[in-house]
Image: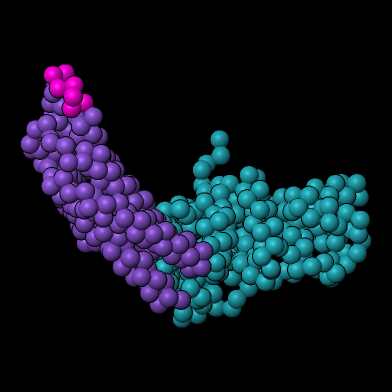
Chain colours: A cyan, B purple
């Protein structure tokens, strides 16, 4: 049987040179749940998100200490980066489709991982566009440039692209920050649907969004996790004064 | 934004306090009307109930506005939600006082079958409970809430006694049957008032502690 937690983090500390961006992070991320990370700008939530697929490796002078265990495997010691990125997909704040066709955007990952058969690729593209709730809108123009899609469609395409390599976890860094309310709603509904198969970790500046879509919420402040609990509890009856002050708008 | 929320919360809170004092005053007046068989005072109780109802509506509108525009969370959310619940209980207490006043008018100037002893005793406790539960809401005093809620048992016990006594009188005094029935109804209304006071205590407990309690 699969364990309840998909990620377990033990004493994670992260430094950008002299600056400590994350301090003694201990958290367990549950499988097939949506976990929201909230907190004021610069609190470390996006940095934390990026430790989960080692995006911080790209930043010079970054030192990561502690254990990030994905299904029993330490992602900083026991796995190669390509495998990690396949298992942990990411969707960014600004939709960033590749400047190629809709079809090629989704097929890109599987191709990079060695899938060459056209029929299989066709199937992967269709399945994942359907999972991302985009298929009906684009099925007649798969060969057209992805850049011609609306912002909301582009973001769903990026989600389809992330799904195409069959990840276990999807990281989302403010995925609706640049979208209108209708497109935001579509992404939120999609997230709710996707959690049946995937574990989702989302950074959001909107506490209302965290409330709407997440099962668990972690509140970050100055590189630390102040409180981590069920979303309903965190927003209705937080246990820490700093959390209460933040969610009621007393600071931050 | 925070200032706006604080101002509006304060405004709602002040309206709630006025509503509370009107409710308290109305039970007191209803009981005075009964004891003195003062029909004018009974009319006043009935008129005042409309004012209580309008406070409920205004507070509710303000709560809805705050939820719709301010996205309250944490203690703000609990405060607004509690207020919303408490005004329903207060409104019901108001209705029970109005019921008592209506019954006072039905009894009219008819001589009472016996001097009123237990009903005023029951009313006194119910009124104190309402008073305490409102203070408990204002001060967030949890100890007080537990004490207050315990008194509900006293009210229930008195009601049982009144009930038995009146049923006994009923058998030998058929000419007073309407009045006996009226007095029974007054007992029932007082018993309900104490129940609503208990609800308010439980709600205030939730507001302070963030957890429900069956006290």
Q: In which quarter of the image is residue B150?
A: top left
As rendered, which of B125 and A149 lies closer to the eye? B125
**Image coords of residue B44 (percent x, y):** 26, 55
Q: Is residue B6 left or right of residue A212?
A: left
Q: Name the residue furthest bottom.
A: A18
Residue A162, magenta (yes or no): no
Q: In which quarter of the image is the N terminus of chain A?
A: top right
Residue B176, magenta (yes or no): yes
As rendered, which of A166 and A91 lies closer to the eye? A91
**Image coords of residue B63 (percent x, y):** 43, 62
Tell me what residue is drawn at x 12 percent, y 47 percent.
B36
As rendered, which of A162 and B167 lies closer to the eye? B167
**Image coords of residue B115 (percent x, y):** 7, 36
Q: Is residue B172 left or right of residue A235?
A: left
Tell me what residue is drawn at x 81 percent, y 58 percent.
A106
Q: Is residue A152 visible?
A: yes
Q: In which quarter of the image is the C terminus of chain A?
A: bottom left
Q: Can residue A11 be seen in this view?
A: no
**Image coords of residue A32 (percent x, y):** 58, 46
Q: Is the magenta stretch mostly helix, strand or loop?
A: helix
Tell me what residue is drawn at x 36 percent, y 56 percent.
B50
Q: Name the residue furthest top.
A: B171
Instruction: Name above or below for residue A198 compared with residue A154.
Output: above
As rendered, which of B32 and B24 lies closer to the eye? B32
Q: Give the range drawn in magenta.
A: B170-177
Tell me what residue is drawn at x 42 percent, y 53 percent.
A233
Q: Is residue B84 left or right of residue B99?
A: right
| Number of marks in picture | 0
Q: Is residue A58 left or right of residue B33?
A: right
């Amino acid at each position: 049987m699969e364990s309840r937690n998909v990620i377990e983090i033990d004493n994670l500390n992260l430094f950008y040179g002299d600056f400590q961006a994350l301090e003694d992070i201990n958290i367990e991320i549950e499988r097939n749940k949506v976990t929201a990370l909230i907190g004021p700008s610069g609190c470390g939530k996006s940095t934390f998100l990026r430790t989960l697929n080692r995006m911080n490796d790209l930043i010079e002078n970054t030192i990561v200490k502690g254990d990030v265990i994905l299904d029993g495997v330490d992602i900083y010691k026991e796995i190669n980066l390509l495998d990690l990125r396949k298992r942990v997909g990411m969707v960014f704040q600004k939709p960033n489709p590749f400047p190629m066709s809709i079809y090629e955007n989704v097929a890109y990952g599987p191709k990079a991982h060695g899938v060459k058969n056209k029929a299989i690729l066709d199937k992967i593209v269709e399945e994942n566009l359907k999972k991302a709730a985009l298929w009906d809108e684009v099925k007649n123009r798969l060969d057209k440039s992805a850049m011609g899609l609306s912002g909301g469609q582009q973001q769903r395409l990026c989600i389809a692209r992330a799904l195409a390599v069959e990840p276990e976890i999807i990281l989302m860094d403010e995925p609706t920050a640049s979208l209108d309310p209708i497109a935001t709603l579509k992404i939120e509904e999609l997230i709710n649907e996707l959690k049946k198969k995937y574990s989702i970790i989302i950074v959001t500046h909107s506490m209302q969004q965290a409330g709407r879509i997440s099962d668990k919420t972690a509140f970050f402040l100055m590189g630390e996790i102040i409180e981590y609990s069920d979303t309903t509890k965190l927003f209705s009856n937080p246990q820490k004064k700093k959390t209460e002050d933040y969610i009621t708008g007393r600071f931050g | 934004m925070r200032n706006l929320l604080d101002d509006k919360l304060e405004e709602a809170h002040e309206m709630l306090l006025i509503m509370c004092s009107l409710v308290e005053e109305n039970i007191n007046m209803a009981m005075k009307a009964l004891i003195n068989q003062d029909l004018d005072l009974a009319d006043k109780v009935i008129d005042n109930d409309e004012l209580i109802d309008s406070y409920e509506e205004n507070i509710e509108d303000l709560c809805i506005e705050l939820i719709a525009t301010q996205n309250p969370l944490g203690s703000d959310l609990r405060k607004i939600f509690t207020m919303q619940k408490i005004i329903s209980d207060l409104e019901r207490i108001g209705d029970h006082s109005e019921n008592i006043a209506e019954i006072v008018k039905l009894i009219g100037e008819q001589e009472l079958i016996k001097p009123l002893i237990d009903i005023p005793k029951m009313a006194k406790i119910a009124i104190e409970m309402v008073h305490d539960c409102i203070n408990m809401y204002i001060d967030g005093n949890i100890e007080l809430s537990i004490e207050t809620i315990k008194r509900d048992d006293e009210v229930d016990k008195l009601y049982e006694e009144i009930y038995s006594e009146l049923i006994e009188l009923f058998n030998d005094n058929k000419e007073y049957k309407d009045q006996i029935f009226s007095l029974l109804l007054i007992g029932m209304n007082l018993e309900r008032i104490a129940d609503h006071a208990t609800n308010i205590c439980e709600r205030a407990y939730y507001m302070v502690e963030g957890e429900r309690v069956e006290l």
